[in-house]
Amino acid sequence: MAIRATVSRFPLDRDAQETSGLPWGVTVTPFASKDENGQPPVYGSEGHLLPRCENCFAYFNTYCELDQWAWSCALCGTLNGLSSRAIARYSHPQSCAEMMSSFIDLELSVEGSDEEIMQARPVYVSAVDLSSSEEFLELTKSALQAALEALPPGALFGLATFSHKIGLYDIQGPIPVVKNVFIPPDAEGTLPIELEDIMPLLQFLAPVDTYKDHITAALDTLRPTTSWERTTGAGQSIDGVLMGGRGFGVAMEALFKYLGSEYGNTFALARVFAFISGPPDYGAGQLDTRRYGEQYASKGEDADRALLPEQTPFYKDLAAVAVQAGVCVDIFAVTNEYTDLASLKFLSIDSGGSLFLYSNTDDSTLPQDIYRMLSRPYAFGCILRMRTSSEFKPGHSYGHFFPDPQYENVQHIICCDSFATYAYDFDFANTDGFSRYASEHPVLQIAFQYTVVVPPEELASSELVSASRGKHSLKRRLRIRTVQYGAARNIHEIYDNVDPEAVLSVLVHKVILASLEEGVREGRMLLHDWLVILTAQYNDTYNVVQFKNGSSVTGQIDVAFSQCPQLQPLPRLVFALLRNPLLRFHEEGVHPDYRIFLQCLFSALEPSSLHRAIYPVLMSYSTPDKQAYPRHSLSRAALITSGSPIFFLDAFTMLIVFYSSTADPTLPFPPPQDCLLRNTINKLKQDRSITPKLIFIRGGHDDASAFESYLIEEQDVDGSGFTSVMGFVSFLEEITQSVMEYMK
């Protein structure tokens, strides 16, 4: 569990927080195998015996004061008695994890009989869009073949299709058989028959290890629905235009109910892979994609506001059904037509799933992405709970989770992998803040309860092994991290303890929220104004400028934060974020679905990855085996002055190797497989949550526009948002002017 605070020394009180101009919060990556310093948790058992505070319910931890009969809670100060069992346990401190570390992972006892515990198996259901092209289906087949290689041997797999009808495949017989049910065309309609009545769920779900060949044979039978089929099936047209064919909403609703009937019995987690090639346009949940297009010019609407909110609550409501049924939904959209992901996204983000968007089938990384996603460890049925010491409290929480309807600061996450990251911001609980003289420090405790599927081979030492031959077991665990922070005595101390990447994470969440509620223009203004206020507060704190008679300035405004190294990256990060498609205007050609994809991606990334996605890392090499400089600014000037022949740019979703036009022609191109540069690339690809595209460009021979588009410091961010000749320098000049206006 990695926790990164925006400031590692907390502001003393509300005045200090406001004066600093910085967001105050943390990012949390709960299922990360190590903390932010690379330390793993201490593992233990009997998590149900861990003492809890009678007042605030925080867990006992190493910051609590312990005597023979009682302990004082580090969060609220309450004195709690110890049970005789706990007294005996703590008389041998080296034998229990909670006495050895503030980062622990404890086994919990799972309710139910051994037989019930052993029965649970991971379930994967693929829902494939047949209102599509041959190319889409070929790509989907490749992706599902990759998925079959990554699935654990005990997994159950089901294949479903959707168009104007839902198809369920029986793959347990000698040849694959598909049973269909037609979807009612009207927007209020539901299926005339339950899927369970068409095919019993256990007939539909087949063990992967036994039926892998049958699944492959079934995939080979997938064909797009023809226009004739759609006409007879959908049977409706408006003004001669064929409507209907992609009944995605009804298909998802039916699948969730189908799977939900066995939740907790046959399976503890089901994942639905939804492969979609365009907007749902048939039956319940159909979307009107005419809202994207020329009508904005005539109505004078702000496209950046109108296309971000969902147009119907259907999919948000459906996501709640998925969460209730224990189903995690991953959406793979392969399309370049407007699909209204703003409406569909709730299915994935509320259920702890992922949303992927590919604009075409030719260079899609879909097979690699699905293999990567299924190969990494993940937890499910997770509950994330944050507690703080009494002086402060969590404000907003951000991330892909389902908030608990009853308890504050409790989030439910159906599925959580080691990359999934969440963010919180803080506020003071009272006007006093943290006492300047008290020995108590601000304390944060995050509890993460989760389940993992343990394959049979890992149960070899268990007494259940004879009963569990070939079956999977569930393990419920409780991971707790307690962190103590210092309180800063002054603003200088806050500034000296800033984590720029954590600040960027919280800012990105805030501007996404502002964009969704008020539009992209509002999100941009919020970010711009934040940097102006921070710069003004910094200049005031360091007495860089003084004002005489309310107007004239003595001293030059320091917009580069030259006296505080920790703040220096922030202007560049804000500039880059304003240049990112996330906050570019609709008129600049940013597709609304791509913007939604970026919102979903950025709001789940841990801070270092987000940094690369917003402001890519550009490094140079003198040869493929020798690095020259580890980091350059994103400008042509940096390329020219470095004199290096080879540049490597890491933009998180894109990796580019660029040979300058003046590079020695004897340097091998592309770089050989066994060189340092290739090893760096391979390691980066392994450690990434999605598959980055790798491009090699030879300056003077190949089109270099893909590489040059990332040299953003020569592209301007002016009031209109359109690019002009000047870039980062003019941006700083504009911030300087705004600071002067603000400080008058």
Image (cartoon, rainbow, N blue to C red):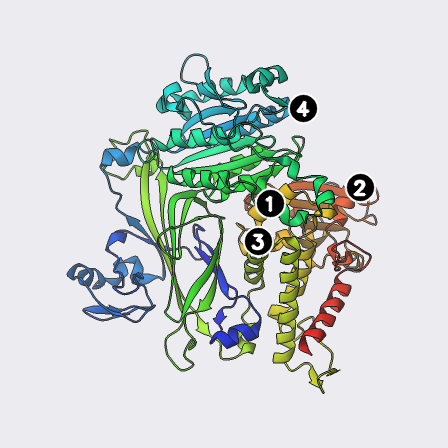
Depth check: give the residue in front, 425 or 152: 425
Give the number of the mark in front: 4 or 1: 4
Earlier in the chain: of badge 3 and badge 2, it is: 3
Earlier in the chain: of badge 2 and badge 4, it is: 4
Give the number of the mark in front: 3 or 1: 3
Question: For the N terminus, which image quadrant?
Answer: bottom left
Residue that label 1 marks: 596
Q: Which circle marks residue 517 in the picture? A: 3
Residue at the location (74% across, 55% down)? 721
Earlier in the chain: of badge 4 and badge 1, it is: 4
- Taking the image as shown, residue 506 lies to the left or right of residue 54, namely right
- Taking the image as shown, residue 645 lies to the left or right of residue 576, namely right
The spot of residue 264 in percent (x, y) is 32, 36
Q: Which circle marks residue 239 in the picture? A: 4
Q: Is residue 558 visible?
A: no
Q: CA distance from mark 3 to mark 2?
A: 39 Å
Based on the displayed image, in which of its 4 quarters is residue 209 positioned?
top left
Question: For the C terminus, which image quadrant?
Answer: bottom right
